[in-house]
Amino acid sequence: MSSAGRAFHAVVSGRVQGVGFRYSAIREGRALGIRGTVANRRDGSVEIVAEGDAPRLAALLAWLEKGPPGARVREVQVEWIAASDTFTGFDVTF
């Protein structure tokens, strides 16, 4: 399935580590049919690279702005990028 060039790189900051954010984001992204990665960053934020069609990416972004219970999202920085079409799933990276 081609992503038709739709992708974003996002950095979510706030209380987003130690609250199940990555794995909740993976569940959400997989349910939406998104491909890409989610990773914790050393500065306490969470980084997401996501590819898919525009409505699914918009739905994931809306979820990222809230996160799972226990998270306190302060900011979501989003950069729209060209899709690489190299991802086959949506997974946590370390």
Image: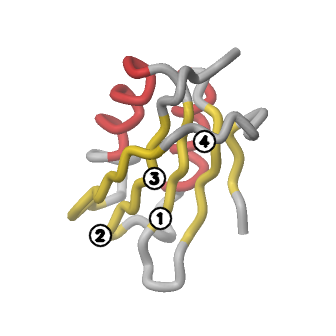
Q: Earlier in the sequence, mark 1 or mark 2?
A: 2
> In the rendered structure, which disc, 2 or 4, sits on the residue that comes first in sequence?
2
Three-letter amino acid code at the position of disc 1: Val
Q: Nearer the viewer, mark 3 or mark 4?
A: 3
Describe residue 72's horizontal placement relative to residue 64 as left or right.
left
Residue at 75%, 40% (x, y): give it: 86
Which residue is denoted by mark 3 in the rendering?
9
Label 4 crowd (10 A; few <14 / some 14-19 / many >=20): many
Q: Which residue is mark 1?
A: 46
| First along the sequence among labels 3 and 4 | 3
Front label number (2 vs 3): 3
Viewer-nearest residue: 75 or 9? 9
- Whether residues under marks 1 and 2 lie with C-beta atoms below 8 angstroms apart, the answer is no
User: Tag 4, which secondary structure?
Assistant: helix
Disc 4 marks which residue?
26
| Residue 2 point in image, percent of width and height | 65, 19
Where, quadrant-wise, is the N terminus in this rendering?
top right
Please rate how many residues cluster around mark 3, counting C-alpha atoms within 10 Å: few if below 14, some from 14 to 19, many from 20: some
Which residue is disc 2 drawn over?
Answer: 14
Q: Secondary structure at mark 3?
A: strand
